[in-house]
Amino acid sequence: MALNPFFLQGSPNEQSLIQQLINEQLKIYGVEVIYIPRKFVRKQTIIKEIQSSLFDDNFSIEAYLNNYDGYSGQGDILSKFGMNLKDELSLIISKERFEDFISPFMLESELNGELELSTRPREGDIVYFPLGQRLFEVKFVEHEQPFYQLGKLYVYELKCELFEYEDEVIDTTIDEIDEQVQEEGYITTLNLISIGSTATATVSINSGYIDRIYLNNDGYGYTSAPIVSISTAPSGGISAQAVAITTTKSDAKSVLAIELVNSGAGYTVAPTITISGGGGVGASATCSIETTYSGITSFTVTDSGQGYKTIPTVSIVGNVGVGTSAVAKAIVGTGNSINSIRIINPGVGYTEAPTVLISQPSILTGIGTYKFNEIVTGSISGTQARVKSWDKDTNILKISYVDDVSSKGFYPGEIIVGSASSATYAVSNYNNWNEYDKYSENVQIETEADNIIDFSESNPFGVF
């Protein structure tokens, strides 16, 4: 039998009035908490286990504290493993306020697959309780109490337990929240050093060398740098070597210049220069030689240096009398080191080998300050980690793991670069043991056990 149509069982206006009264009561008698939704960074695909979580949003909302006489739960438990806090908290928030002011901002994260169900509070989210300055994890959301007054639900009751940190990323931009977990979780240590070192080189001088190359025709149609061949020096001499530098003009690639790698020695007549390959044609060059006075024939890089982000300056210091000083340029190779020095002008008039000075790298002492929670990456291993803290005075970087590509952690000598700060230092050594956890005594226990029992024996308790 149908309900009596003359009694509404709750009209929309009545429901709206109750919701508004509840909202008002919460604003008067409640406390402002910070609601922080959990985002899924990485899941285990078989059983859908959450392996890594991110808390980087924060929403202020008023809540009524149901615990009028203190925290509920089991309280503080003392055991041989230390103190375990089992405090619980019950908070009541407005259903309408959550759906109007928090859910719309969570919807985008839901569409991106970072979280599930943006329309209501979820188990696993955390709440910052400012009165106790503590983080609580939502364990259960009660949405049917009070039970359908006038045919509608008006509040959510969040039943929370004290949050136990397990390497989740908490980056809400609120310092009093983020700093609570700065020293929590599994923390490993990188001892860093300055990454730069100045390159060094020596020089050889001789006579009968190529003192200048003339590019007679730059050619056309090159798809790569052509090969430069120089005819062999006479017996007892040193054959010259050079490379071609190309350029693009009006969508056509041609030879821009020819640079000497070795200017040779012992030539009595100008050698022949042949330019071939590279997919183009037409380039040609000739040269002149110096047979009386000495000039630079080659450079030897004795230390490649490290940390060269830009091409350094090469200065050649030596007495040339009335002659001309040499000019050279360094070539920066892989690893930001100097792999060769080319001769732009070999100079003339040297009576003894000059001194080569190469300018310092721009990051000789390391640069920047690592930021809390940013990702750092090893240049060789590819291992990534998240910054916990950085002490620039001691060059100690505390990190928590994100992704260990090499399965060996960070390599000594590799460069560590911060994704947000662009800070750049090199690894001196890496300690993958969590020395900051006072309960991590596995190594000590194993060492003491080895002094009692010889585990190298097949049966350490005797042979029967």
Image: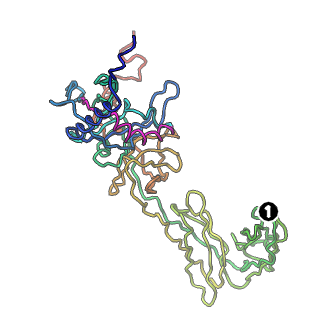
Task: Assign the C terminus to one quadrant of the image.
Answer: top left
**Is residue 76 in sight in this rendering?**
no
Residue 300 left/right relative to 363: right
Task: Please identify the residue farthest to the left as the structure is shown.
Answer: 69
Looking at the rendered image, the quarter that the N terminus falls into is: top left
| Residue farthest along the top direction in this orientation | 464
Asked whether 177 or 217 is in front, the reply is: 177
Q: Residue at x 55, y 70 (%)?
A: 312
Is 49 displayed left or right of 96 in the figure? Answer: right
Query: Against 278, is 157 above or below?
Result: above
Q: Main secondary structure of the magenta part?
A: helix
227 to the left or right of 14: right
**Foreground of the two, 460 or 39:** 39
Q: Position of residue 5 (x, y in %)?
A: 37, 19
SS state under label 1: loop
Mark 1: few, some, or many residues within 10 Å (few <14, many ≥20)? some
Q: Position of residue 404 (x, y in %)?
A: 49, 40
**Residue farthest along the bottom direction in this orientation:** 322
Residue 74 against residue 334 in the figure, above or below: above
Give how far across and how far down residue 165 sits, in percent.
Answer: 33, 35
Count of marks overlaid on the render: 1
Give how far across and how far down residue 429 sits, in percent.
42, 48
The residue that label 1 is drawn on is: 278
Q: Amino acid at mark 1?
A: Gly
Magenta range is: 88-112
Q: Is residue 91 magenta?
A: yes
Is any atom of residue 105 visible in this view? yes
Height in image: 439 above or below 422?
above
Q: Is residue 8 magenta?
A: no
Residue with the most extreme front position: 6
- In the figure, residue 256 lies in which quadrant? bottom right
For image coordinates 24% across by 30% down, the residue present is 89
